[in-house]
Structure formats: C-alpha cells, structure tokens
Image (cartoon, helix red, strand yellow):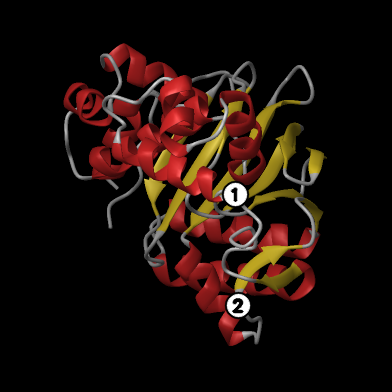
Amino acid sequence: MGQPRDVHPAVEDPRAEHARYWRFPGLPGTELLTARFVTTSFVRHTHPTYTIGVITDGIEEYSHPGGRARVGPGGLAVVGPGEVHTGHAGVPEGWGYRVFYPSPEVVEGIAGELGIRGTPAFTESGIHAPEVARILVNAHLAADHGDPLTASSLTRQGLGLLLRTHGRGTSAEPTAHSARPEVERARRVLAARLLDPPTLEELAAEVGIGPFALTRAFRSVHGLPPHAYVNQLRVDRARALLRSGHPPGDVAVRVGFADQPHLTRHFKLHLGVPPGAYQRALLTS
C-alpha cells in the first residue's frame, strides 16, 4: 500500500482544520481518519461501520443513542454501526483525533475469538481507557507510516482489549420484533426511490399510516426522520461509488442529489470533507 496522502496541503498552523481519510493497510474492511476540526459541526448521521476515535487533543462533544458525551485527550469516542450521532467542538480550539472505521465483520471476528456472542456493542460511548487509547494511537501511527504488520497487530490488540473491558454481545436486530411494520415498508420504499423520493404524505398513504405517526415511528426505529434517512442513504451510496472511481458530478446524479454542490454540502455535513478530497485520498492510499 502507498503512503496516505493529505486531503489538504500542509498547513503551518497546527490548530487549523484538516482531515485525511485513507484505507487501512493490513486490516481489510477498515478506513482511517486523522483530523482536526474547529468550526465543523456534524449533523445527525450514521455510519455502516463502527466508529472508534481516540481524542488526541481538545474536546469533542456529541450526542448518541445513550445521551451526550464529552471526550478529551486520551478518551475514546465509540459509536456502533447505524447509531445516530452528531459531533462538534467542546472547546474553542476544537479537537483532534485519530479514528478507525472497522466493518462489523472485522469487529465481530475479533469479538468471536474472545467468546462474545452476537453483534458486539459497547457499554458506553465516551470511554476512558488509557491503555486502549495508547495502543490504538500507535496502531494508527504505524498505518500512517506504512507498516501494515505492526498496524494490524496493534489494532487487533487494542480492539480486543476494548471489547474485553467495555464490550457486550447483542442480538442482530434488537428492534425487529417491536418495530411497526409500516416503518419497514417505508424504509424499503425510500431505499428504492432515492432518485425520486415521495413526499411524506405520499409515503404515509402508501404504507397506510398518518404522516405524523410515520415520522415519529420512523425516528424511533432509525434515529432519523424519513427525509434525513434518505440523505444518509445517498451519502452512504456516494461513498461506495467514489471509492470505485466514479467522478463526483456523476455520483451526485446517481444517488439523487440535484448537483455536485448539493452532494458536497451533505457529504461535508456527514464526513467533514468534500467528496473529491475523500476520493483522492482513498484512491491513492
């Protein structure tokens, strides 16, 4: 694997905003992020992967399904796949962090070796685990320096320790039996119609429930109202297309955004970087 490439040119001010995504050399199914954010604020969004960030300086604040967290240097910000969360600076100087985005299969594999059954989850989101943080930072640095053996070994060691100390097993779909069937039907309609989504009234009529009740039930299950869920799906599909080399302008049309600026605005609200920079970094790593 090649060396990761900066999304932005090098800057003299270490406190300036910057972000760099790249693919993890040595652990398939994982992306990495090194970033400093000051004014960037993330809307409510999800990731299909786990999000495990080690705060290196400053403070990040964010909401998550269990409430709100405020994490400083040496702490871990941990969010599971599909868990709705936000993110913003907790102090004027912002925060810096190193983030792992391992796929569910990667984390499940490590958990399975530890005897954790079901889909791995964590007992809390803002986690104080200095030894885990130290190991994962060293893993991140090893990946940054192009040492896949050290990076993959330390990542598995750190994730294993995190799962042993703060992990638990869960069922694969904890809401499957309690969710209203209309919500699942609505989700399928939205996923199939990203290019021409129905109005809320049309969607409610199609699944047989009132608009207000649908919005409330949908948010209860997915953490987002229908319109925000559509934008989340569009960004997720855009990421996959960008990783495959499709031009951002083409991607915008393929996933249902009006144009490339529309894609860029939502992409930055979810990931903190524009789609072109995200693509360049991943395709050259």
Instruction: Locate residue 254, reporting x and y percent.
Output: 20, 30
Answer few, some or many: residues within 10 Å of disc 2's Cα (few below 14, many 20 plus, some between 14 and 19): many
* Residue 111 disc label: 2
Decide if residue 105 is on the left or right side of residue 38: left
* Residue 180 disc label: 1
Considering the numbered disc 1 on the image, is that residue within a helix, a strand or a loop?
Answer: loop
Considering the numbered disc 2 on the image, is that residue within a helix, a strand or a loop?
Answer: helix
Decide if residue 12 is on the left or right side of residue 6: right
Residue occupying the point 20% across, 21% down: 249
Residue type at the position of mark 1? Arg
Say which of marks 2 and 1 sits in front. 1
Residue occupying the point 49% across, 33% down: 229
Instruction: Locate residue 49, reporting x and y percent.
Output: 49, 54
Where on the picture, by quarter, is residue 73?
top right
Residue occupying the point 76% across, 64% down: 131
Dot 2 or dot 1: first in sequence order is 2
Decide if residue 191 is on the left or right side of residue 41: left
The reply to whether residue 281 is visible in this rendering is no
Against 175, residue 193 (above or below) is above
Residue type at the position of mark 2? Ala
